[in-house]
Image (cartoon, grey):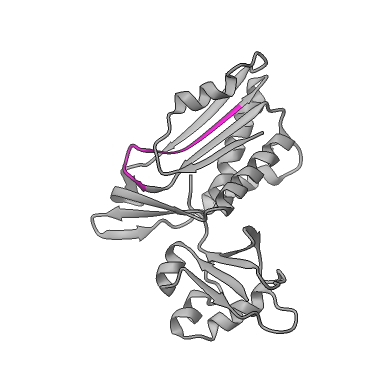
Amino acid sequence: MAHVRVQAEPFEAGREIAALAEGRRDVGAVATFVGLVRDLNEGAEVSRMTLEHYPGMTERALEEICAEAAGRWDLIDMRVVHRVGPLEPGDAIVLVAVSSAHRGDAFAACEFIMDYLKTRAPFWKKESTLSGERWVEARSSDDEAAARWSGAGNGRS
Amino acid sequence: MISLLYFASLRERLDCAREDFALPPGTPTVGTVVDRLRSRDGRWSEAFAPGRAWRVAVNQRMADLATPLKPGDEVAFFPPVTGG
């Protein structure tokens, strides 16, 4: 049921959200997250960012994350769009949109998908700063955010 | 034969994106292949040194050193992911 896309082109968040409700009358909530490129990271000014990924595995990993969300919450549909290639500060990198009958499921699943995407989907960021190019290091706070969901029950403790 | 793929900083450090690799005899695992890679030269032994953060996927699923390998497998090595 999930719709997953990896693309170099920009996406339009409004169109993605509209697609979730199109032709349906049972959608009561759509929760969305949009991630953007910041101009400052680890104290350095970022002029450009390039996103690399592992074609094939990326799509599969995103689909598996969505399937796991569908097993945990009562969801109607999901869309994940992730950009690759060169990006600039202010550009949108990723969109996660989740529809459900009630907001609680949509909110929780949206955050869960992002937390898992950050630690499980094979994307890598390279930043251009004034002092040259550098690969972005993985953050332990992202691992901790993903680990919140692995406890007993539905979602956070 | 198996395919080895390298991504992001690991690809740059090793100056290699992809190679064909003869599967060692016996019951090879990811660990068997990593041992062979470590024995290549300083660049390779450093990239795969114990304690260095890298991840491995076999046939596009996350794997580990104990994952068994068979002819035709696609094994990818990469740094911890940083998408989103």
Horizontal and vertical percent position of residue A79: 57, 33
Residue A8 among magenta residues = no
* In the image, farthest residue toward the left: A130
Q: Is residue A21 above or below residue B14?
A: above
Query: Seen in the image, is A12 located left or right of residue B52?
Result: left
Name the quadrant of the C terminus of chain A. top right
- Extent of the magenta region: A86-98
Q: How many marks?
A: 0
Q: Residue at x 59, y 51 (%)?
A: A120
Residue A108: x, y in percent?
63, 31
Q: Which one is nearer the viewer's eye here, A23 or A98?
A: A23
Residue A74 is drawn in which quadrant? top right
Determine whether A137 is above or below A73 in the image: below
Q: Is residue A117 above or below residue B33?
A: above
In screen coordinates, is B3 left or right of A136?
right
> With B63 as the anchor, is A38 left or right in this view?
left
Q: Quadrant of the N terminus of chain A?
A: top right
Residue B27 lies, in percent from the top left, at 75, 79
Specify whether residue A88 is painted magenta: yes
* Residue at the image position 45 percent from the left and 43 percent from the top: A7
- Choose top left, top right, bottom left or bottom right for residue B30: bottom right
Q: Position of residue B2 (x, y in %)?
A: 62, 73
